[in-house]
Image (cartoon, rainbow, N blue to C red):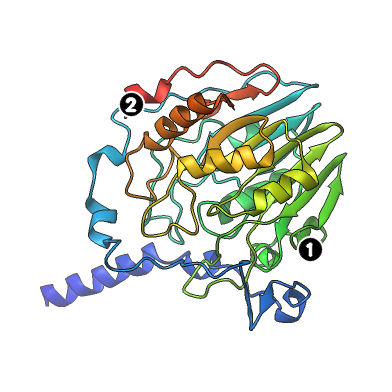
Amino acid sequence: MKKALAGLLGLAGVAWALKDVPRQLGGKPDPVHMSRSPRYRDGKFHNDKEVRTVPDRESFSIRDFVFGGEDRKPSVEVPLVRPAAPVSDGLHITWYGHASALIEIDGAAVLIDPVWSDRVSPSAHVGPKRLHPVPHELSDLPDISAVVISHDHYDHLDMETVQALTAGTSAVFVVPLGLGAHLARWDVPADRVVELDWDESHSVDGFTLTCTAAQHFSGRSVQRNVTLWASWVIKRGERSVFYSGDTGYFPGYKTIGAAHGPFDAVLMQVGAYGDAWPDIHMTPEEGVQAFDDLGGGLLIPVHWATFNLALHPWGEPIDRVWREVKASGLKLAVPRPGERVDVDNPAEVDGWWQALA
């Protein structure tokens, strides 16, 4: 009897932990709508070349990923920076950790890949958990013109954050093809969703938001690549920012730079890399090379510090970026989570993370 009761309680616990999963998975894109893209064939989106998205057994161990490496977490609390005073001119970028960032140009703002949840997982109770708190509340944000999403993985598209922004702002969601189905499942009004293919643009409040190429994949379940992934160009007036999204290194950066540059600042993915997935996440050195291919500006590394999504040490991505940048003479800013960067007058890199690694 006791064993049966324990079993029932265990099943109830599993059901409770997974209760949010069906809604978290999002919606199913309309294949007819997706087929307007030249990248959509046989029911899926494709990169310009075939890439490996699933690690092989020789290069990846689930046990090591879940349990290995104490240095994959900071040794002490990550320093956070509280909200700064409002700004009405210039170009400022606030990094919240991982890939979430706010771009402010002359007082107008765009929010990129906002993730405010504690876990990046279909369950609020299981999966990679934050290594530091969110430095600002959503209520601390200025008025947002648009929310820009790079792709539908959980560490970039967060259902609870989307729902909060839908209720608390009037921002339009500008997303790659297919992500509108997820947003519709989460009750975002259709007139607040704009879906774009690569090389398409949308204008809002003086911003021109252009969907550009990336080398990655998509999926919130076992079904992959039914939605598109992208990088983004964010322009307003004479100011311009590039955001890489998640990507492997590919030759398209020079093309993007020639078409849309020069850039004042570049938010570049440099973390969560590994030998098991070399085609879909760049190493720090590849991130610096991609930044150089684009035509430079100020490099702000992202996709590190907040979630444990790879086997490399916690601070290694930025150590390697800093070493590479110093050798190349490029411009770098490494803000603490929550810290606003004045792109025209960035603070000197001080190695703040090294005492935490």
Residue 140 placement: quadrant: top right
Q: Compared to 245, does 88 lie above or below?
A: above
Locate the C terminus and report the quarter of the image it occupies.
top left
Q: Which of marks 1 and 2 is in front?
A: 2
Q: Which of 156 and 138 is in front in this view?
A: 156
Image quadrant in which you'd find residue 57: bottom left
Residue drawn at (33%, 44%) of the image: 312
Q: Quadrant of the N terminus?
A: bottom left
Marks 1 & 2, CB-CB < 8 Å contact? no
Q: What element carries label 1?
A: helix
Amino acid type of the residue tagged 1 in the rendering:
Ala
**Which residue corresponds to mark 1?**
190
Q: Residue at x 72, y 21 (%)?
A: 86
Identify the amino acid type marked 2.
Leu
The one nearer the camera, 160 or 281, is 281
Would residue 170 be seen by someone viewing this image from the given angle? no
Residue, x 39% and y 50% (percent of image)?
A: 309
How many numbered tags mark residues here? Answer: 2
Q: How far apart are marks 1 and 2 (CA)?
A: 44 Å
Q: Residue 356 carries which label?
A: 2
